[in-house]
């Protein structure tokens, strides 16, 4: 807040678009949009700068209105002072929830009072850049079942520095089996489909969730949001799966850039005693993920708890005649690692010593050496899967060797390279690139890479069959 208070509400930002974007011609008749901004106890200048950046950088005829949805904030500046300030700007409506609803139902309230052709949702700590709106609306004008996201640039939360990258470095959305959203490089097949033009819209399996535009008619048709979801989380994957499985398309538009302040932790109260994200995620898994939901449920031993009633959402899926999750995985997210397809899994135990390959794969563990630890038969950090592509992995962490001293944990990139391993008939584990073998050190404490020699310290016992045949074919 201190940094934000010192910076102009109308600060200038660099034109972050690739040069091709500046000369693109958009359709003459574009739909207009309501921009919906939900907030709970947002800082004064941060919220105001969000609103001004929308007003300052959107063509007036395309911006029908800005709807501020106050999700039961209790800070004084968001009451009468906000009303007075916004009344002078025109185009800005304020609506307020009667109790704390969370961002999903707050967005639904914004939708219910909106009048534009398109809904554009933004967080309450964003800054729109030059030319952000036209490329989004242009895609929806082409086909109203395309749901579009701008590139989300990082505004640093301590300095407000605006960071941005070229269209070449645009990332797309994925998820892991904890149902957490994550970012990935654009896969080769998608680059090829776009004829290697970096400024072209990119298809994305999932969206981050905070910033996107959708035709109001289409939003209505595909069932808006699940109103049974509370506070935060899960709604982005729910919407992503629903859009793809029910005939729509999800894209990221490299020519549209909006900055977003990424906070190190959530600054407001959630709900005591309930794991809200888990509950929301179970709701979406029950409705959309068919048998694949079990990979998620395994993570908490199938202890689902009370996730409420999802029968209406199931009826929606039926009414819309949506495709299966298996179709989604195979056609929209073929790079997703599916645990049931692992060719080997479980602990990786050395023959010479009762030691196992052991490492956490949390992001703070990336780049750190992989350890050896006495085998404990409890899974956890000793549970590894060998993917069809030769990765040794858990979630998004892969064993990676670049020829130096240690094998490290690195985000999986599915490009083989340093992450391709071969578990051979003779029980050695070969690194394809360097043709070296995994070996435990003489004292048993370290994992080394050495010329293959057939010593017992290079032999590994790894359960060969998939953990359990969870995946049945979805009819
Ligand atoms: N939000 C809300 N009610 C809530 C939680 C969040 O209105 O109970 C708003 C919040 O002010 C923000 C948006 O929803 O504008 C997304 O939340 P947040 O920025 O915390 O999510 P993140 O960007 O960290 O994923
Ligand atoms: Mn946010």
Image (cartoon, rainbow, N blue to C red):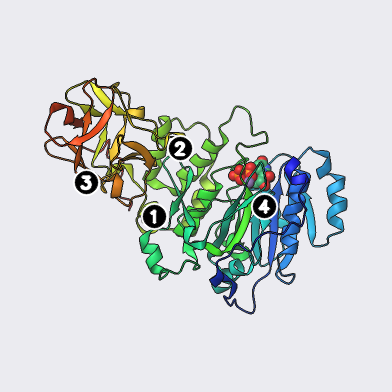
Residue 313 placed where, x, y %?
Answer: 52, 49
Q: Residue at x 75, y 62 (%)?
A: 55
The residue under the point 35% across, 32% down is 369
**Residue drawn at point x = 49 percent, y = 40 percent:** 282
Q: Residues within 10 Å of mark 2 (few under 14, many from 20)?
A: few
Question: Which residue in the structure is indicated by mark 1?
Answer: 333
Q: Nearer the viewer, mark 1 or mark 3?
A: 3
- Judge from the rendering whether residue 105 lies leftward or rightward of residue 337; answer left or right: right
Residue 29, picture quadrant? bottom right
Q: Write down which quadrant ligand 1 falls in.
A: top right
**Residue 113 visible:** yes
Q: CA distance from mark 4 to mark 3?
A: 45 Å
Distance (Cα) linking label 2 and label 4: 26 Å
Q: Which residue is mark 4?
A: 126
Which residue, given by chain and number where applicable, does mark 2 sit on? 363
Q: Position of residue 18 (x, y in %)?
A: 55, 66
Query: Mark 1 and 3 residues: CB-CB less than 8 Å, in contact?
Result: no
* Mark 1 or 4, closer to the camera: 4
Residue 104, numbered circle: none
Q: Earlier in the sequence, mark 2 or mark 3?
A: 2
Disc 1 crowd rating (10 Å Cα; few below 14, some 14-19, many 20+) is: some
The residue drawn where x is 60% and y is 60% is 257
First-in-chain label (4 vs 3)? 4
């Amino acid at each position: 807040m201190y940094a934000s208070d010192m910076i102009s509400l109308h600060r200038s930002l660099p034109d972050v678009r690739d040069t091709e974007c500046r000369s693109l011609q958009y359709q003459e008749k574009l739909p207009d949009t309501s921009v919906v901004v939900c907030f709970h106890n947002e800082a004064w200048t941060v919220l105001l700068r969000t609103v001004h950046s929308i007003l300052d950088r959107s063509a007036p005829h395309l911006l029908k209105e800005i709807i501020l949805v106050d999700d039961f904030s209790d800070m004084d500046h968001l009451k009468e002072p906000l009303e007075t300030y916004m009344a002078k700007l025109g185009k800005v409506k304020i609506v307020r929830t009667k109790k704390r609803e969370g961002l999903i139902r707050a967005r639904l309230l914004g939708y219910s009072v909106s009048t534009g052709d398109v809904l554009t949702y933004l967080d309450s700590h964003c800054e729109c850049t030059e030319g952000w709106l036209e490329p989004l609306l242009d895609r929806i004008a082409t086909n109203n079942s395309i749901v579009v996201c701008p590139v989300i640039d990082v505004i640093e939360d301590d300095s407000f520095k605006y960071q941005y990258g070229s269209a070449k470095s645009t990332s797309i959305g994925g998820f892991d089996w904890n149902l957490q959203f994550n970012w990935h490089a654009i896969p080769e097949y998608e680059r090829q489909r776009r004829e290697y033009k970096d400024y072209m819209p990119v298809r994305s399996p999932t969206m981050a969730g905070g910033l996107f535009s959708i035709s109001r008619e289409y939003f209505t048709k595909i069932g808006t949001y699940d109103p049974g979801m509370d506070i935060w989380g899960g709604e982005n994957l729910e919407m992503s799966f629903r859009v793809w499985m029910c005939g729509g398309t999800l894209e990221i538009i490299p020519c549209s850039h909006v900055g977003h302040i990424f906070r190190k932790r959530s600054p407001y109260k959630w709900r005591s005693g309930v794991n809200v994200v888990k509950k929301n995620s179970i709701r979406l898994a029950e409705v959309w993920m068919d048998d694949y939901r079990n990979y998620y449920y395994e993570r908490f031993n199938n202890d689902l708890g009370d996730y409420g009633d999802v029968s209406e959402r199931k009826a929606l899926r039926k009414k819309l005649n949506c495709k299966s999750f298996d179709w989604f995985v195979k056609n929209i997210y073929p790079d997703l690692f599916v645990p049931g397809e692992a060719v080997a899994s479980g602990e990786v135990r050395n023959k010479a010593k009762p030691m196992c390959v052991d490492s956490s794969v949390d992001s703070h563990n990336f780049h750190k050496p992989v350890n050896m630890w006495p085998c404990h038969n409890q899974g956890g950090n000793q549970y590894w899967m060998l993917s069809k592509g030769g990765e040794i992995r858990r979630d998004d962490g892969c064993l990676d060797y670049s020829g130096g001293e240690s094998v490290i944990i690195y985000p999986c990139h599915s490009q083989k390279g340093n992450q391709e391993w071969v578990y051979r008939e003779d029980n050695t584990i070969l690194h394809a690139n360097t043709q070296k073998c995994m070996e435990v050190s003489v004292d048993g404490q370290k994992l080394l890479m050495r010329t293959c020699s057939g010593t017992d310290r290079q032999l590994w016992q790894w359960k060969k069959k998939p953990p359990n045949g969870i995946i049945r074919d979805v009819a």
